[in-house]
Image (cartoon, rainbow, N blue to C red):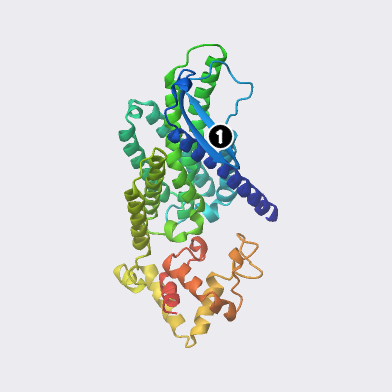
Amino acid sequence: MPWLEWLSLFVRWFHVIAGVAWIGASFYFIWLDNSLREPPQQKKDQGIKGDLWAIHGGGFYEIAKYAHGPQTMPEKLHWFKWEAYSTWLSGMALLILVYYFGASAYLIDPSVQALSPLQAVLFGLGFIAIGFGVYEIACRSPLGQYPTVFGVALALFITFTCWLAAHLFSGRGAYIHVGALVGTIMVANVFLVIMPSQRKMVHAVSNNEPIDPAWGAGAKLRSVHNNYFTLPLLFIMISNHYPQTYQHDMNWLVLALLMAVSAWIRHFFNLKHHGVIRPAILVSGFLAMLAIAVWVSWPKASFSSEHNAKTTIEETQQESSLVSVQKMTDQQERIENLIATHCRSCHSATPTSELFKVAPLGVVLDNWQDISRYKAQIIHRTTVTRDMPFLNKTGMTDAERQILSKW
């Protein structure tokens, strides 16, 4: 429905704007905290823990951080919370609009799990809720007192969630649900720990009461968690544009590795804020990304080899269909028949698909001239990434993909 598409556009646009504001603030305050230096004695006497000078927008800024809090509460105190809340709220709205209302198209892959739309939605919500619960319990357990051990355990947990999501949903649905889980963890860190800790500090200063250092330490720890999650989350937000990742046979491992490398690269910048320059982190991160790209793009065994390795009654029927198609002497007619059968319902000036009212990305394949123009894209998307036809809703066989590959 057109109104639903417009609503999806506006919600997505708002989600991006809110996300930029939240992640920008997160990056800035982590940089600010890591860049503070020991202040002169006169500032220490005022309770200032660290300070820095900066220049921006044609002016100088002097920034100071108190060890605990000022002697009196200022009249105007700026809080940073709605950037996080609005990002999560708009993200969940987008998840519902695109993946839950369109569960049969975007969330369910019968070759992974034959779920009903209701089952898929319930599994999705359960995945997010239970995953967040496990993280929160771990943070509040004794494990949370050992940052290095906790970091390893968290990496293993995220890897497991990638595996689980990939065995429940379509590739795109799996990636977006891992992203929804990470986003939920991040905003819950703000809502459940960071904001309550800051309210306690404000209350203490307003009432001339002592500040418990544990309040600030707990909030800082969750902020650090959020900081390392930002780059992995940004990748997931754009991952639906790169089917070679979520359509891979080991898509869960691709996601886990890309998230790990993204967090590792973020570590370089966190160290740099402290004045520690480790080029080896960037070099190793680049090499890891390159290795992932080579692995994901490495040519697979030919369709015929896969076909011969596993013969079934259904594949025998596909062979018969292939024989009948190959009897056509004109290659153009064979290709046009395949495009008409598997592509044209969406990629047409007048789509007949219930999923798309306008040809996706403006790609129209109504005649041989159009087909020839998009030849490279057609072959790549059907035989390399294999994300087309969309979630293979039309049931394109390996034998048919082989015809396109030879073309």
Describe residue 7's horizontal placement relative to residue 270 as left or right.
right
Q: Position of residue 368 (x, y in %)?
A: 57, 80
Dot 1 crowding, Cα within 10 Å, few <14, some 14–19, many 20+: few
Q: Amino acid at mark 1?
A: Tyr
Q: Nearer the viewer, residue 277 or 335?
A: 277
Q: Which residue was labeled with disc 1?
A: 61
Residue 18 image-quadrant placement: top right
- 388 shown above or below 337: above
Q: Does residue 310 appear in the picture of this structure?
A: yes
- 14 shown above or below 340: above
| Farthest residue, direction top | 208
Q: Nearer the viewer, residue 78 or 189?
A: 78
Residue drawn at x 50%, y 71% as measured from the top left: 377
- 18 shown above or below 328: above
| Farthest residue, direction right | 3
Residue drawn at x 56%, y 43% as measured from the top left: 19
Q: Position of residue 124 (x, y in %)?
A: 49, 43
Q: Does residue 161 appear in the picture of this structure?
A: no
- 370 shown above or below 162: below
Residue 157 image-quadrant placement: top left
Total marks placed: 1
Q: Position of residue 380 (x, y in %)?
A: 46, 70
Describe residue 361's horizontal placement relative to residue 49 as left or right.
right
Q: Nearer the viewer, residue 173 or 54?
A: 54
Q: State which quarter of the image contains the C terminus.
A: bottom left
- SS at badge 1: strand
Q: State which quarter of the image contains the N terminus.
A: bottom right
Residue drawn at x 60%, y 21% as measured from the top left: 74
